Amino acid sequence: MSREGCARAVERMAAAGVDQRAITVFEHYWEQLAAGEQGMVREDTLEPLVDVPELAALEVDDEARREALARVAVVKLNGGLGTSMGMAGPKAALVARDGQTFLDVIVRQLIALEERFGARPPLVLLNSFRTRERSLEILERYPQMADQALPLDFLQNMEPKLDAETLAPVTWAEDPDLEWCPPGHGDVYVALAASGLLDRMRAAGIRYAFISNSDNLGATCDPDIAAWMVAEGIPFAVEVAERTLNDRKGGHLAVRRSDGQLVLRESAMVVDDDQEHFQDIRRHQWFNTNNLWVDLDRLDQLLRERDGDLGLPIIVNRKTVDPTRPDSTPVIQIESAMGSAVEAFEGSVALRVPRSRFRPVKTTNELLLLRSDVFELDERWRVVSTIDRGDPTVRLDPTYKLIHDFDARFPQGVPSLRECTSLQVTGDVTFGADVRAVGDVEVVATEPATLPEGARLEGRVELPR
């Protein structure tokens, strides 16, 4: 590949005002890509992760919790547009449940911490240009948010999509915005430094950042973890939960054989021959929740030592320049995962947490479950289960994929799932009020149909009937 492609990409990034540290990281990844690096992590280089400390075993008192919360900032990754659900704005502006958006719930969770402990960690959103305005509008509902010492957001960096054949910046005259992409959530560390926010946090006495996704309402700022990080002087912690069959294709933590260092292996880093081992949930038991705790002093030191490049493993993401058009130019998006920074911090640890700290919403299947009576918001605005067993499995027809179509088919609210173990809907079905699903339910409609108010669903239900 011609190095000219890299030079052209760098020129475009500089002209767009991208910070030099982000440009340096991009250059390093481009060189790896041109040399044939695919970021693969082979099974024979790993050992399974065992002996993981557990959140439930931490012993912390209220004074330690209060002191730790005063030294933590909450960073939420908020660049997602919810395009997979047909949204044009930030996914976090979507109603999660009880009339509250994801951002409303996140803010209320932090306010509840302040009411209980007298300390409210500042909230900072990692936005994109497309999510910034609407997200900040929602935060304006809460006057106390304007009182924090830190800005409410900062912006992720951007880089050119690369023509998959030449590795030069792709051009797409129909929509030049599609020529650009974010560098994956591993960019959060460089973006913190480039925005000046890292320096401002440390100057304000903030020692740790708790980083998580805004669509995961289970990722609350837990004062026990904060106090544990402070007391033990831990530089970097990854929250992990026990893998189930549903998690077998998700990233997991393991130990590198050569030096005993914790590493993250995502599905994009797995060669075909290793898929069986990667998906073996008995061998690799712990998946990455993407809830991270980072020592900001140590992060600053590493970024200065390495010119802004933490050396995170490359992820090669192959797409088309217009993701809605499979016939458009094939491109490569160079990305990295923020959890892979676990290998950059000497002394990093994994912490076992309950499944309740991992409740992401990536599809309308998960949104239906979150809005159902399987969950409720407690007095601290935490999402808690109302049942004493595993969550029901939800599989909706593609008719429900887009949020507008989803909401139109549940005009009176989603069905009761408290007695349900699985719900599968095939076809176009509109649900009336107070529909109740019991046990394993399969609803099948060969043409558009409506379930009447108060319907009780059991077994296979064929519509119309």
Image: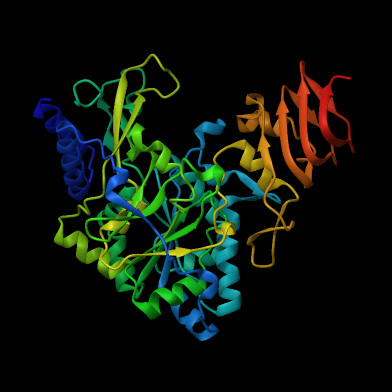
Q: Is residue 287 left or right of residue 383?
A: left
Q: In this rendered view, identify the residue nearer to me: 245 or 29.
A: 245
* Residue 192 appears in the picture as rendered: no
Residue 133, x across and y down, in percent: 46, 45
Residue 371, x across and y down, in percent: 69, 46
| Above/below status of 326 relative to 335 | above
Residue 329, x across and y down, in percent: 32, 18
Q: Is residue 330 left or right of residue 406?
A: left
Q: How many marks?
A: 0
Residue at horizontal 63 percent and vertical 37 percent from the top: 365
Q: Is residue 4 left or right of residue 331?
A: left
| Above/below status of 119 relative to 359 | below
Residue at horizontal 89 percent and vertical 35 percent from the top: 453
Q: Is residue 309 left or right of residue 206?
A: left
Residue at horizontal 35 percent and vertical 51 percent from the top: 264
Q: In this rendered view, identify the residue nearer to me: 432 or 57.
A: 57
Report the residue that reaches farthest toward the left.
Answer: 3
Residue at horizontal 20 percent and vertical 36 percent from the top: 37
Residue 417, quarter of the rendered image? top right
Colour scheme used in the picture? rainbow
| Above/below status of 4 relative to 415 | above
Quarter of the image containing the C terminus?
top right
Residue 234, quarter of the rendered image? bottom left
* Residue 269 appears in the picture as rendered: yes
Quarter of the image containing the N terminus?
top left
Residue 63, x across and y down, in percent: 51, 85
| Above/below status of 441 relative to 282 | above
